[in-house]
Image (cartoon, grey):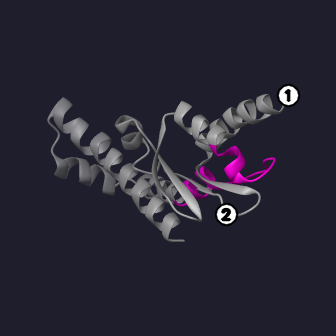
Amino acid sequence: MKDYLRRFVKFLLFILVLFFLLLFVYPWLKSGISFRDTFEALSGSKNIRLVLILVFIYAFIYPLINFRKKERYINGTFEDNREDIEKSMEALNYGKMSEDDEKIVYKRKSRFARVVMLGEDTIEIFKSVKPIIFSGPLRDLKRIDAVLDSKLLGKQM
C-alpha cells in the first residue's frame, strides 16, 4: 500500500506540473497572458472540473495498471539459474542495487530512464519463494520475461 500511495502521489504531481506548464506558463510565454487571466478563464469554465476529476482518476488507476508482481517458474532453484538471470538483467541495462536472503533489487543504469519513470524503475526479484516473483513496472517485466525465456529455454535445448 505504501508503494501504491507513493506512486500515486508522484504521478499526480507530475500530471499537475505538466498541466500547469501547458495551461499557465505556455500562454504566458507565447502571448503574454498573465497567470491571473488564465486562472479566471479556467475557473469560469465548467469543463475544467471534469478534466481535473479525470486526471485524478487516471492518476489513481495508473499505478494499479502499470506496476505488478509476476510469478516466474524455473527449472531448479534460483541459485541454479542465478547466472542466466543476472546476465538477462545486465543485458536489459539493470544494475544490482542490493541483495539479501529474500530478494534482489535492480535499478536501471540509465539516469534518463530513471527520470522518465520518476524513480519507479526498480525491479525486485523475490528469490526465496518457488516460483520466484518479479515485481516492478509491467512493461519492464514483460521485457525481462522474454529475455529470460530465450536464455533459460536456450540452455535446456
Q: Nearer the viewer, residue 127 or 7?
A: 127
Q: Is residue 61 above or below residue 21?
A: below
Q: Nearer the viewer, residue 106 or 43?
A: 106
Look at mark 1 in the image and give the residue it sits on. Answer: 157
- From the viewer's perspective, is 46 left or right of 91? left
Give, as a three-letter code, the residue at label 2: Ser
Residue at disc 2, secondary structure: loop
Q: Quadrant of the N terminus?
A: bottom right
Query: How far across and how far down the image is residue 74, in percent?
Result: 78, 48
- Residue count near mark 2 (Cα–Cα under 10 Å), binned few <14, some 14–19, many ≥20: some
Look at mark 2 in the image and give the residue it sits on. Answer: 128
Please tell me which of labels 2 and 1 falls first in the chain.
2
Magenta stretch, residue numbers? 60-82
Query: How far across and how far down the image is residue 127, in percent?
Result: 65, 58
- Residue count near mark 1 (Cα–Cα under 10 Å), binned few <14, some 14–19, many ≥20: few
Residue positioned 14% across, 35% down in the render: 32
Query: How far across and how far down the image is residue 61, in percent?
Result: 58, 58
Q: Is residue 3 magenta?
A: no
Residue positioned 67% across, 51% down in the render: 79
Give, as a three-letter code, the residue at label 1: Met
Q: Quadrant of residue 12?
A: bottom left
